[in-house]
Image: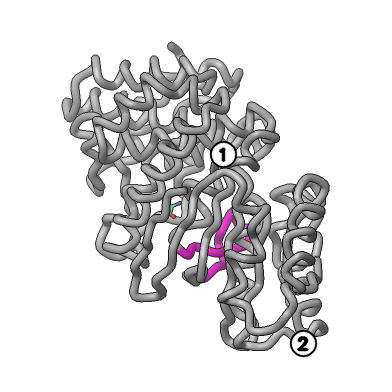
């Protein structure tokens, strides 16, 4: 098992990564539970696979469990579900000193974390991420949110978990498209700040996706260690360090918006293609070599993630795609900061990019 310490002004905690952690969940969480009971939020899909083993672990430790099941899917990450969850937690008489457990992917972690930040002005929560994307990104760093009519993740809070248990066994039952989508966030850490890790990904992505235990542990632990370093430096995304985690997200957001935030393009797929676009745009601006930008595209395509906009079958032009960026929550006083690359492993934040320039570039990509 790998243990990564996260140290932020908002909280210090461990991220434990290994196979079989959910079978030991009661023992690992017990030090954080004040009562002989555990309040667990999950969703209907995750419950089917993981409720029974988690219940067995708590029962063996003499700890009763109380379950709240959200309907599976990103559609549940909304204000109404947040309100209903809070009412349930209050009816259960969860106290400020209690700890709520979030068992599931990003949707469960984000809404439960936000509920924990609000309940009685804030109580502790534990992240038990069951998807690759949640294990390497959303469960670490304390971003919590729900989606609003005006856009994704627009209402939220920074609220650090008290513990994260990433059970690699949970990845065994993930649909392969979801696994690949989560892998985009793994290779992101190499592209943005660690050329050696990117090279490792080129050599080992197939092993990670095929279920090789050592490769999975290395991929998740290296990703979490990178994220821990970044959020330790810039918990609230004020100095610019944390903004680098948005590599590929601005281009990806435009593509997700154009495809209606639907399963035509999963979030990680949008990020994967977005990273290719950020690299090609950086090359066009003379910041990085074209060969390195194409090396990224080749790797993304080699794992079955989209590397060409043309694969999406869009009918819009570059201007319409760029227009989606105006609604990006990263807009700052009329400018949109872009994460660009000076090379593989050398991301930086560029505030000088104009939307007209991006629109022209996207027009060229659509025509490729
Ligand atoms: N997913 C980006 C961040 O946690 O800052």
Which is more toward the observer, 202 or 362?
202
Give the residue displayed 52% in from the left and 60% down from the top: 164
Q: Is residue 335 visible?
A: yes
The residue to which callout 2 is attached is 93
Q: Is residue 84 visible?
A: no
Above-or-below relation of 59 to 213? below
Give the residue displayed 49% in from the left and 20% down from the top: 206
Instruction: Confirm whether the magenta stretch covers residue 146.
Output: yes
The outermost residue toward the top is: 368
Above-or-below relation of 272 to 20? above
The residue to which callout 1 is attached is 267
Left or right relative to 145: residue 295 = left
Left or right relative to 259: residue 305 = left
Which is more toward the observer, 275 or 65?
65
Give the residue displayed 76% in from the left and 73% down from the top: 62
- Dot 1 falls on a residue whose secondary structure is helix
- Dot 2 falls on a residue whose secondary structure is loop
């Amino acid at each position: 098992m790998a243990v990564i310490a996260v140290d932020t002004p908002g909280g210090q905690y461990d991220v434990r990564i290994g196979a079989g952690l959910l079978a030991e969940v009661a023992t690992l969480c017990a030090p954080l539970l004040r009562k002989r009971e555990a309040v667990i939020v999950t969703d209907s899909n995750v419950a089917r696979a993981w409720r029974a083993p988690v219940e067995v672990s708590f029962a063996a430790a003499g700890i009763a469990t109380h379950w709240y099941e959200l309907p599976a899917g990103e559609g549940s990450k909304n204000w109404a579900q947040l309100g209903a969850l809070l009412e349930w937690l209050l009816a259960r008489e969860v106290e400020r000193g209690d700890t709520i457990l979030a068992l599931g992917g990003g949707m469960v972690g984000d809404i439960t974390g936000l509920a924990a930040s609000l309940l009685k002005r804030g109580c502790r929560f534990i992240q038990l991420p069951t998807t690759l994307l949640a294990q390497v990104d959303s469960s670490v760093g304390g971003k919590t949110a729900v989606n609003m009519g005006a856009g994704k993740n627009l209402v939220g809070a920074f609220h650090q978990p008290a513990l994260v248990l990433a059970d690699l066994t949970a990845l065994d039952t993930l649909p392969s498209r979801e696994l690949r989508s989560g892998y985009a966030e793994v290779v992101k850490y190499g592209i943005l700040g660690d050329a050696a890790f990117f090279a490792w990904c080129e050599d080992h992505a197939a092993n990670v996706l095929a279920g090789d235990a050592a490769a999975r542990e290395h991929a998740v632990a290296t990703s979490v260690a990178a994220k821990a370093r970044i959020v330790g430096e810039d918990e609230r995304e004020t100095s610019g360090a944390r903004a680098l985690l948005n590599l590929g997200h601005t281009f990806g957001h435009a593509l997700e918006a154009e495809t209606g935030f639907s399963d035509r393009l999963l979030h990680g797929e949008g990020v994967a293609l977005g990273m290719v676009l950020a690299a090609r745009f950086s090359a066009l601006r003379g910041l990085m070599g074209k060969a390195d930008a194409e090396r990224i595209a080749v790797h993304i395509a080699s794992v079955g993630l989209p590397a060409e906009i043309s694969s999406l079958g869009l009918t819009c032009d570059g201007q319409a795609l760029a227009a989606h960026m105006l609604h990006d929550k990263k807009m700052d006083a009329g400018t949109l900061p872009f994460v660009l690359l000076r090379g593989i492993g050398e991301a930086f934040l560029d505030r000088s990019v104009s939307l007209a320039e991006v629109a022209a570039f996207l027009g060229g990509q659509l025509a490729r």
